Image (tube, rainbow, N blue to C red):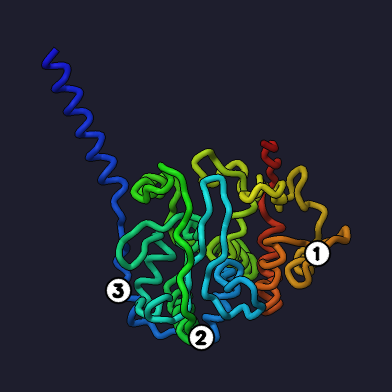
Amino acid sequence: MRSLFATLVFLGLVALGAFWWISEPKPLDVARLNDIKGDPARGKLVFDAGGCSSCHQSPGQQNRLLVGGGLELKTPFGSFFVPNITPHTVFGIGKWSTADLANALKAGLSPDGQHYYPAFPYTTYAHMRDQDIADLMTFLRTLQPLEGNAKPHNLQFPFSYRRLLGVWKALYLDQSPIVDDPKRSKEWNRGHYLVDAMAHCAECHSGRSELGGIDEKYRFAGGPDPEGKGMVPNITPGEGGIGSWSKADIVELLTTGLTPEPDEVAGSMAEVVKNMAELPKEEREAIAEYIKSLPPRASPPKK
C-alpha cells in the first residue's frame, strides 16, 4: 500500500513537472528586431492588413487611428477587453521595444512574460516577417498617445488561469514562416502571406475545437460566430461557400462591403472591410487570388 502511494505521488509530481514545463512562457530571441529600421508608410499598410483598428479602436468615435482600446469581445469563454496600443508610456505600449512587439505577435507574450489569450490572433501574426513587425512598430509610435486602460478580462475558472495557455499554445501555436511557392504567381504568394500572416481571415472563418483552436478540417469553412450571432460564412469553394464568386466579386466585397447577391456585410465584417479598403487595390486583388485557390471544404454543422 505504501509502495502504491509512493508511486502515485511520483507520477503526480512527474505530471505536474511536465505541465509546468509545457505551460511555461517561452519568449523568442528577437532582440535583432530592435536594430531594424522601420518604415511608417509600410507600417500603416501592416496596421490596415492586420485589422488593428477593428479591435483596438476606442469605442464611440470614428477615428480609426485612436486605438485606445476598451472594446468588449464576447466569447464562450467569457469577455475579453481590448488593450490600449497607443504610444502612451503609462496606459499604452510607449515603453515597448520592437522585440516586445514581436514577442506579443509571434509568441503571444507580454513584455513581462505573461501569456496573452488568443482572442488576440497571434496564431496568425506568428507568421509575420521581421521587417513588417519593425514597420508596424514605427507606425504605432506615430499615433496619438491616449490615456485609459481597458477593463480586466471577465473569465470563469479555469480559463482565468493564464498558465493553461502554455498548454494551448503547444497544441495550436505554429510559428513557422510562410515560404513563397515558386510554382505560384507573385500575386498568389502575396495573397497567401496577407491572408495567413496578417489579415487573419481563418481566425473568424473557421470551425473550432472545444478548446478554441482552429479545427483544420474546417479551416476557412466558416463556423459559429463566437458572439453567438449565427454562423460566420464559409469562404472556400466548398458546399455553402463562395465557389460561384469571381475574383472581382471578392475584391468588390473587400472594397465596398457589397456581395454579388447583392447584399451588404454587417457586424465585425463591416469593420474588416474598412481596413481592407485602406489597402492598395493590388493587395485586395492578391487576397482574392489566394482565397479563390482555397481547397473546397464543407461547412461545420451548426451547434
The Cα–Cα distance between marks 3 and 1, rounded to whole angstroms, is 42 Å
| Circle 3 Cα neighbour tier, 10 Å, few/some/many (<14 / 14–19 / ≥20) | some
**Which residue position is annotated with label 1?**
249
| Circle 1 Cα neighbour tier, 10 Å, few/some/many (<14 / 14–19 / ≥20) | some
**Which residue position is annotated with label 2?**
144
The Cα–Cα distance between marks 3 and 2, rounded to whole angstroms, is 26 Å
Residue 274 screen position, x and y as percent: 69, 72
- Which residue is most to the left? 2
In the picture shown, does residue 214 fall above or below 54? above
Q: Earlier in the sequence, mark 3 or mark 1?
A: 3
- Which residue is most to the top? 1
Q: Earlier in the sequence, mark 3 or mark 2?
A: 3
Q: Which mark is residue 31?
A: 3
- Left or right placement of residue 253 versus residue 104 in this view: right
Q: Nearer the viewer, mark 1 or mark 2?
A: 2
Task: Identify residue type, mark 3.
Answer: Ala
**Which residue is located at x 60 percent, y 41 percent?**
217
Residue 196 screen position, x and y as percent: 56, 60
Q: Nearer the viewer, mark 3 or mark 2?
A: 2
Image quadrant containing the C terminus? top right
The answer to whether the residues at label 3 and label 1 have Cβ atoms under 8 Å apart is no
Task: Identify residue type, mark 2.
Answer: Gln
- Which residue is most to the right? 262
Residue 154 screen position, x and y as percent: 48, 53
